Image (cartoon, rainbow, N blue to C red):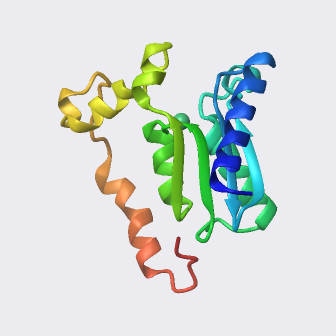
Amino acid sequence: MTKEELMRKAIELSNENVANGGGPFGAVIAKDGEIIATGVNRVTASCDPTAHAEVSAIRAAAAKLGTFNLSGYEIYTSCEPCPMCLGAIYWARLDKMYYGNNKTDAKNIGFDDSFIYDELELKPEDRKLPSEVLLHDEAIKAFEAWMEKEDKIEY
Ligand SMILES: [Zn+2]
């Protein structure tokens, strides 16, 4: 499949998902023009606020391939990812991302991902989410154990 055909598949998934009661988002993970996995937004159906199309596609691809590292693969998403999904795309080590709609298009229909992008620009104390450091001395012990562990699987 060409990159346009792969994006059309992501768009088709987003359309189907609206008809199925989900959000208007679809994603495809592919390599050499071949689809490995797909995902749609299942936030309301699954009662899972993290079940965005891109995260769903990454989970499906990783499970299918039996690896947490999706380098060599590309993601086609019907909309520019929110910060959570963008982070997931980086963590998955995907090679390239294509997107159809952008975050302003999403904002215009009530999915305000740009709000989180704006929050990321702020210092923690200036964000809308109150947050504070707690028990740092105790929490750091797991990091020390990690550093000392010799047979760890790095990711
Ligand atoms: Zn997302």
Residue at screen point 64% across, 23% down: 24
Camera-side residue of 29 and 116:
29
The vertical placement of 106 against 36, above or below, is: above
Residue 22 drawn at (x, y percent): 72, 21
Residue 129 drawn at (x, y percent): 32, 25
Judged from this view, the residue extending furthest toward the bottom is 150
Camera-side residue of 111 and 125:
111
The vertical placement of 86 against 16, above or below, is: below
For residue 54, which quarter of the picture?
top right
Residue at screen point 52% across, 42% down: 99
Residue 120 drawn at (x, y percent): 28, 37
In the displayed structure, does residue 2 sit left or right of residue 155?
right
In the displayed structure, does residue 96 sit left or right of residue 7?
left
The vertical placement of 155 against 19, above or below, is: below
Residue at screen point 67% across, 25% down: 43
Residue 151 drawn at (x, y percent): 58, 84
For residue 46, which quarter of the picture?
top right
Camera-side residue of 140 and 31:
31
Camera-side residue of 138 and 51:
51
Image quarter (top left, top right, bottom left or bottom right) of the N terminus: bottom right
